[in-house]
Image: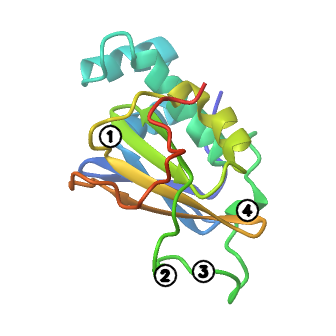
């Protein structure tokens, strides 16, 4: 049986939901499919039934199991499921260290390369200032690699700062150009 970690609370919204982790003091937004998967886990709905219900609700035919497994793995990776160790990095940093949540960058540095991913029906373009984080990113997201979308739903910039990485992004980008300039090394193909 997979259950939520103590101190995890779900709040339903019109188009999905939010998970709140008391220990980490953070919120995690869920789209409608992920919110259903969270509730199905808590109600101990069998995977077969959950996958069928995801497809009945709009998941592409044959993708219900993938959506289910992706959601469960995200919940596990984010430390919301019992038996999944949350990362110390998930805890809020001590006051006064680094950028604060919501603080704006003056500018985005040039991006060295990009990768494209798809999770459920959302297209992501992720750009990097260097290839240093790629072994971690590609290890986690290899199954989500996809061909580039004409206009991604989400653009994310991973900016190396010393031994740490800052993440900046925008959702539902509607312009026809990327939010940052890319170098000639940018990739318009999925990661191997």
In the foreground, 152 or 26 = 152
Q: Quadrant of the C terminus?
A: top right
The residue lying at 60 percent from left, 58 percent from top is 129
| Sooner in the amino-acid sequence: mark 1 or mark 2 | 1
Residue 32: x and y in percent read: 32, 40
Q: Considering only vertical position in the picture, is 12 above or below 101?
A: above
Residue 55 shows in the view:
yes
Residue named by callout 3: 99
Q: CA distance from mark 4 to mark 2?
A: 19 Å
Q: CA distance from mark 4 to mark 1?
A: 27 Å
The image quadrant of residue 161 is bottom right
* Mark 2 and mark 3 residues within 8 Å of each other at the beta carbon: yes
Q: Please tell me whether mark 3 or mark 1 is closer to you in this view.
A: 3
| Sooner in the amino-acid sequence: mark 4 or mark 2 | 4
Q: CA distance from mark 4 to mark 3?
A: 14 Å
Residue 84: x and y in percent read: 73, 41
- Helix, strand or loop at mark 3: loop
Residue 166: x and y in percent read: 60, 66
| Sooner in the amino-acid sequence: mark 4 or mark 3 | 4
The residue lying at 25 percent from left, 24 percent from top is 57
- Helix, strand or loop at mark 1: helix
Tag shown at residue 32: 1
Tag shown at residue 103: 2
| Sooner in the amino-acid sequence: mark 4 or mark 1 | 1
Residue named by callout 4: 89
Q: Please tell me whether mark 4 or mark 3 is closer to you in this view.
A: 3
Q: Quadrant of the N terminus?
A: top right
In the foreground, 57 or 170 = 170
């Amino acid at each position: 049986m997979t259950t939520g970690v103590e101190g995890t609370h779900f709040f339903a919204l019109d188009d999905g939901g939010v998970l709140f982790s008391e220990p980490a003091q953070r919120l995690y937004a869920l789209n409608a499919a992920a919110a259903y998967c969270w509730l199905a886990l808590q109600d101990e709905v069998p995977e077969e039934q959950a996958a069928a219900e995801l497809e009945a609700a709009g998941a592409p035919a044959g993708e219900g199991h993938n959506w289910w497994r992706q959601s469960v793995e995200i919940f596990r990776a984010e430390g919301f499921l019992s038996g999944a160790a949350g990362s110390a990095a998930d805890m809020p940093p001590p006051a006064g260290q680094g950028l604060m949540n919501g603080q704006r960058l003056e500018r985005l540095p040039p991006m060295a390369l990009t990768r494209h991913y798809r999770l459920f029906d959302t297209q992501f373009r992720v750009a990097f200032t260097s290839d240093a984080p790629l072994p971690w990113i590609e290890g986690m997201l290899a199954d989500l690699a996809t061909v580039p979308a004409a206009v991604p739903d989400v653009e994310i910039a991973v900016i190396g700062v010393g031994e740490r990485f800052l993440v900046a992004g925008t959702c539902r980008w509607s312009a026809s150009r990327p939010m940052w300039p890319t170098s000639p090394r940018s990739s318009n193909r999925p990661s191997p």
